[in-house]
């Protein structure tokens, strides 16, 4: 930068990209940066001196109207009115693409989520992943990634056997096995198996008949529930296929030549503690049979063989050990452990009338996705599941989610979009068209709204980088509050016989940009942006 070169200092000491933030106190300017504090030592001057030189260089430029040095070297910047107007123009020019970036362009991502066992309807934990996983996929795509959404059906092992025995018991009119599954859905599926195969109970291979038809019926129910929830998958991968194809045996043989696997007490162990697991895991048991993790390893081999650069697993709260386990598996295969990411989601609880809701009429013991959707609708369910970090447990208040008031976050955001859509329709009816004299937007509330709108691309980028869709939801709530405050302070449409001014038209242009950002943000969460409410 010339400001350093003129003083005989090294201009390359300054970073190529500078982080700026919006101050909480508007009196501190539109934006602030601590770049002088971060780089003064590298330059060889005091941070206060460097901040002063940078302030002198930036003051009076086309985009910045003023720069103040605060404290030991913070820079507080105020944008020129016309520069703020460019934010509005950028939004309207980009339209539905506003907020999208290219940081992940060229990256192929396998995003596996929900992956509930096909032994019952999707419970609330799976519902949370259906909402968050789908939103994360949309956000990663908005950052340029090529995303494949994948569902892993655990259709092998003891749980399937218990499911089938439960179906057979229901078909015979007997109680469910002690370790089996209960609930109305078991009886429904058992009855459908008998309808399709009337002789299923007397067949020599009745267990296989109930398995084939019953598991298939459960699959279809799960797929339909997900589709109705707005979550669709590109790939449904069956665990059983890994065993039948010999992929598990092949992966195990490959691992035996790895230093990440060792033989002890008659079994083969994976050194998963080296990657944060609480203990090393058995891959081949002492009886020579593969342990469950062997299938996980074969599945990882399959994913990487399909050309995915990054494999993201979204798992439930009881799967924390999988973080180290899967990274260790990648290392054992001679792969990069960073090609594997595991996100752990915490539990979801429903509350109504201040009391926990615990029972489902159909599932018997848990609340299902269908129960939640029946209670509050798809939009409210998806938004409520997506607006909190998955690192923490979530209590959903059914009474709140049913309210048509600003206390309900999804209503608050959707109403802001609907209010803007109505405003634009009213303007069209009055013959008022948006105008481009955006340098007239000098009111504090106008500036607040413009700058909040301008934050959207950064929010989308950060949500993708940190794998945190809730950042988009919380941003939309902030935008809604900023818009409502703007609307109360700044008259957009002329009253009665009042003449339409360029200021009215400029404000209408700002409203059009704000509506676009609401639509884009809600789309990333898979939530509708209603025109009327």
Image (tube, helix red, strand yellow):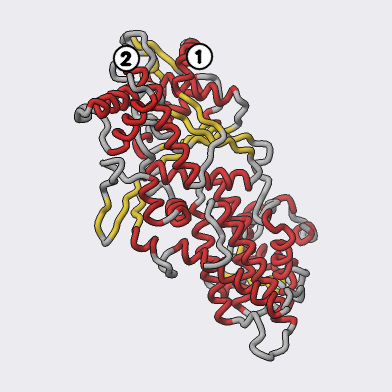
Figure label count: 2
Q: Secondary structure at mark 1?
A: loop
Which numbered disc covers residue 245? 1
Q: Note whether 189 is above or below 207 in the view shown.
A: below
Foreground pick, 330 / 374: 374
Q: Secondary structure at mark 2?
A: loop
Q: Note whether 3 is above or below 136 in the view shown.
A: below
Mark 2 / mark 1, whichever is N-terminal: 2
Q: Is disc 1 surrounded by few (<14), some (14 to 19) or many (20+) residues within 10 Å?
A: few
> Label 2, on which residue?
203
Measuring 43% from the left and 69% from the top, which residue is drawn there? 405
Q: Note whether 199 is above or below 401 in the view shown.
A: above
Q: Are marks 2 and 1 in contact (CB under 8 Å)?
A: no
Foreground pick, 51 / 231: 231
Q: Residue 58: percent from the left, percent from the top?
A: 73, 67
Q: Residue 403: percent from the left, percent from the top?
A: 39, 66
């Amino acid at each position: 930068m010339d400001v350093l070169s003129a003083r005989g200092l090294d201009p390359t000491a300054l970073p190529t990209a500078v982080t700026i933030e919006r101050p909480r106190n508007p009196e501190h300017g539109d934006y602030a940066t601590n770049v002088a504090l971060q780089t003064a030592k590298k330059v060889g001057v005091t941070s206060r001196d460097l901040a002063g030189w940078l302030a002198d260089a930036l003051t009076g430029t086309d985009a910045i109207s003023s720069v103040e040095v605060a404290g030991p070297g913070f820079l507080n910047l105020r944008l020129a009115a016309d520069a703020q107007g460019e934010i509005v123009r950028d939004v309207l020019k980009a339209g539905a693409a506003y907020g999208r970036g290219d940081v992940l362009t060229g990256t192929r991502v396998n995003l596996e989520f929900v992956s509930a066992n096909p032994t019952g309807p999707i419970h609330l934990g799976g519902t949370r992943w259906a909402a968050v996983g789908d939103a994360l996929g949309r956000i990663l795509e908005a950052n340029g990634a090529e995303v494949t959404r994948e569902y892993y059906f655990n259709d092998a092992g003891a749980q399937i056997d218990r499911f089938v025995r439960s179906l057979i018991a229901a078909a015979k009119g007997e109680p469910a096995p002690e370790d089996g599954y209960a609930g109305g859905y078991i009886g429904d599926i058992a009855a459908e198996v008998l309808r399709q195969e009337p002789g299923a109970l007397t067949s020599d291979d009745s267990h296989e008949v109930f398995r084939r038809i019953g598991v298939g019926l459960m699959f279809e129910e799960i797929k339909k529930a997900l589709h109705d929830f707005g979550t669709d998958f590109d790939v449904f991968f069956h665990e059983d296929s890994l065993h039948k194809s010999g992929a598990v045996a092949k992966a195990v043989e490959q691992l035996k030549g790895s230093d990440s696997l060792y033989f002890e007490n008659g079994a083969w162990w994976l050194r998963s503690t080296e990657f944060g697991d609480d203990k090393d895991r058995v891959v081949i048991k002492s009886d020579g049979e593969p342990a469950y993790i062997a299938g996980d390893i074969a599945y990882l081999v399959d994913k990487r063989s399909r050309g995915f650069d990054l494999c993201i697993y979204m798992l439930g709260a009881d799967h924390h050990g999988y973080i180290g386990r899967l990274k260790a598996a990648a290392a054992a295969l001679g792969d990069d452990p960073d090609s594997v990411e595991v996100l752990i989601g915490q539990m979801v609880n429903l509350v109504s009338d201040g009391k926990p809701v615990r029972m489902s009429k159909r599932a018997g013991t848990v609340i299902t996705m269908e129960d939640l959707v029946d209670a509050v609708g798809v939009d409210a369910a998806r938004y409520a599941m997506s607006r909190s970090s998955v690192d923490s447990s979530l209590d959903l208040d059914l009474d709140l989610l049913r309210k048509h008031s600003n206390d309900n976050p999804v209503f608050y955001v959707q109403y802001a979009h609907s209010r803007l859509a109505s405003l634009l329709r009213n303007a069209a009816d009055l013959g008022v068209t948006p105008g481009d004299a955006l340098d007239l937007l000098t009111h504090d509330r106008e500036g607040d709204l413009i700058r909040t709108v301008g934050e959207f691309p950064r929010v989308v980028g950060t949500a993708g980088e940190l794998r945190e869709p809730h950042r988009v939801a919380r941003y939309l709530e902030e935008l809604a509050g900023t818009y409502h405050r703007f609307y109360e302070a700044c008259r957009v449409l002329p009253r009665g016989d009042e003449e339409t001014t360029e200021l009215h038209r400029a404000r209408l242009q700002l409203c059009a940009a704000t509506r676009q950002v609401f639509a884009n943000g809600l789309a990333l969460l898979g939530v509708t942006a209603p025109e009327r409410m």
